Amino acid sequence: KPARPAAPVVVVVAAMSNPFGISNLELGRRLDFVRSLVAKKHPGDDLEPSLIAEGLFIGNKHHAADVGQLCRLGITVVLNCAPSGIRALPLNDYEAKGIRYAVTNVKRDDTSYPLLHDRAGVRSAHLDVAKEVFDVARRAGGRAMFFCVAGQNRSATLAVAALLLCDQPLPKVLHSCAAWRPFVLENEGFQRQVVELEALLLAQQARGRFPQANVQGEKRLMCSGDYIADQPTPNKKPRTVCGLETTVEEVGRLLIGSVSRTLEAEQAFGF
């Protein structure tokens, strides 16, 4: 009796509809994981910045204005992740206490804003600034605080992303946020970008280097005293701040050279 032909093997492959090397199914699972830990209801009271990793705090605009608290917590570098509307900051007091001030002008916090990267996976200048500021604080033996208006979406997303770029796994970072600041990452678009960044970094060896910002003309950072700002210059001459113009690679050297107060390195932050 002749043998029956073998039944065809059907392989179901999850559709990849994005350039980040993660299927829609896995993306959904990772987003569910994010939301199981963070994006909780804001408690109303937010008295001081939250230490989510060794050397990195997330705070709000009120924390940024409290120089005494910043000093007590050992914060030596402050990164303003809000739009340029936050102006009433005690920058003279920062300078007197040796606290460095940096800014990356995140103009919007809607779900479509490319805070970490665009839909092609090209890294944003905001993320470059955040990573460099955090590196500067660590190399100088100090601590950084990223802040925005509420310390909930823009600053928190950049803080989480900076830690991912420092080889910290996303579950570890999110568990820390859940313990100390569980209301962060409420913006669903920013949640998605965090998961996409994790996928890009996990696939980095197989897919090549993380794509860098690509604009016509050089993407620059302006640095003068206590001020750093990303400044894309596609079609016009970049604005100069106090006659000093610099690129992202030079920011660390300039900041380290100008920090007037450093702290002894803290013991490893336990998770």
Image (tube, rainbow, N blue to C red):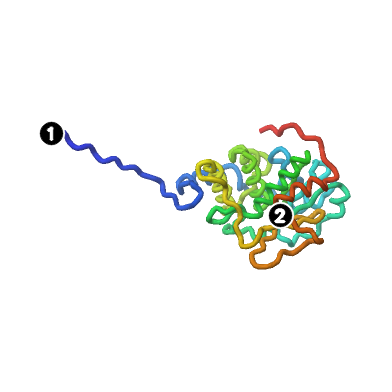
Estimate the x, y position of residue 103 in percent, counting from the top left. 74, 55
Residue 150, percent from left and from top: 70, 53
Per the image, the residue denoted by label 2 is 247
Q: Is residue 255 left or right of residue 15?
A: right
Q: Residue at x 65, y 67 (%)?
A: 235
Q: Which residue is mark 1?
A: 2
Q: Give whichever of 241, 141 is nearer the camera.
A: 241
Q: Residue at x 62, y 38 (%)?
A: 168
Residue plotted at (74% across, 62% down): 85
**Circle 2: element type:** loop
Mark 1 or 2, closer to the camera = 2
Residue 167 visible in rendering: yes
Q: Position of residue 75 (x, y in %)?
A: 79, 44
User: Number of marks in the image?
Assistant: 2
Q: Secondary structure at mark 1?
A: loop
Q: CA distance from mark 1 to mark 2?
A: 74 Å
Residue 9 appears left or right of 43? left
Q: Is residue 67 above or below residue 176?
A: below
Residue drawn where x is 62% and y is 39% of the image = 167
Q: Amino acid at mark 2?
A: Thr
Disc 1 marks a residue whose amino acid type is Pro
